[in-house]
Image (cartoon, helix red, strand yellow):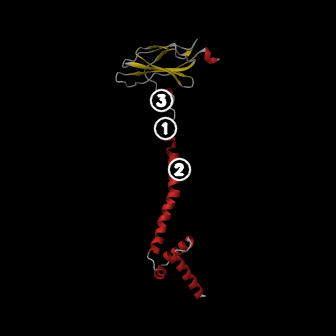
Amino acid sequence: MTQGRDETREARLAAYRDGNLPPDERAALEATILADPEASEELYAQLGIQDALERARGAAPRAALRRLFTVVLPLAAAIALLWLGPQWQQQLGAPPEPPRFRSLPGTLRGLEPQGELAAAPRQFRWQREPSAAQYRFELYDREATLRYDAVARDTLLILPADAAAVDAGFWRVVPVDSAGAELRPSEPLHFTSPDARR
C-alpha cells in the first residue's frame, strides 16, 4: 500500500517538475510544502527546484492584494460616495437656494410696491442706504425664479418696456459699496396682482 502511495507521489512530483500538473493540484502541493517544513526539505530534494517554496509563500500576499482590489477598495469607494455624494452634487451644479434664504434681512427697506396690487408692478422704490454707491435690483416670480435684475444708482427703478411684467412674486435690493462689496440685502417684498389670481 505504501508503495502505491509513493508511486502516486512520485508521479505527481514528476508532473510538477515538468509543469504538467493542473493549477489546483499545483497549489495544493505547494500548500503541503508550506504546511510541513520537514516535508518541504524532502520535496526540495526530490523536485530539485528552489522556487517552489518562494512561489507558495508569494501566493499569500497575492491573495491579500487580490482581496484588497476586489473587496476592500470597492467598498471604500462606495462608502466615500455615500458620504461625499451630496457635497459633490451641490458643488457640481446643484441650483443655489433661492435668494430669500441665502442671507438675513438687513437695514435697507423696500418701500413699494408690496401686497395686493391693481396691476403687475413696473416701478419700484426703496430707502437710501448711506454706505451704498449703487444698488442691485432683483425681481423674482412666485417660484423664486429671477425674472429681472439691474444695477441702479438711485432709489427708484422703472422696468423697461421690453422687460416682462411679473404678476406675483417678490423683489429685493442689494446695496453695493464703492469697493464693490455687497452689503446686507433688503427684506423681500411680496406682491400679487389680479392677473395672478386668475
87 or 114, nearer to the observer? 87
Disc nearer the start of the sequence (1/2):
2
Residue 39: where, in percent of width, then height?
Answer: 49, 81
SS at circle 2: helix
Amino acid under disc 2: Ala
User: Where is residue 89 drawn, in percent x and y?
Assistant: 51, 39
Percent across and percent down for residue 27 are 53, 72
The residue that appears at 56% across and 85% down in the rendered structure is 6
> Quarter holding the N terminus?
bottom right
Rendered position, 8 above or below 19? below
Residue 148: percent from left, percent from top: 50, 20
- Mark 3 neighbour density, 10 Å: few (under 14) some (14–19) many (20 or more): few
Q: Is residue 32 visible?
A: no
Residue type at numbered disc 3: Arg
Circle number at residue 102? 3
| Nearer the camera: disc 3 or disc 2 | 2
Q: Are marks 3 and 2 in contact (CB under 8 Å)?
A: no
- Which residue is located at x 49 percent, y 41 percent? 88
The numbered dot on residue 92 is: 1
Rendered position, 105 above or below 165? below
Question: 43 or 190: which is nearer to us?
Answer: 43
**Do the residues bearing badges 1 and 3 touch, measured as CB atoms within 8 Å?**
no
Tell me which numbered mark, 3 or 2, is placed earlier along the sequence. Answer: 2
User: How far is the residue under mark 1 from the one under mark 2?
Assistant: 19 Å
Residue 191 shown left or right of residue 103 in the figure: right
Work out whether 64 lies above or below 107: below
Q: Regarding mark 1 in the picture, which secondary structure is present there?
A: loop
How many angstroms separate mark 1 from mark 3 (CA)? Answer: 19 Å
Q: Which residue is mark 2?
A: 78
Give the alpha-carbon distance from disc 3 to disc 2, as whole Å: 32 Å
Q: Which residue corresponds to the image point at 46% horizontal and 24% vertical from the top-left?
A: 105
Nearer the camera: disc 1 or disc 3: 1
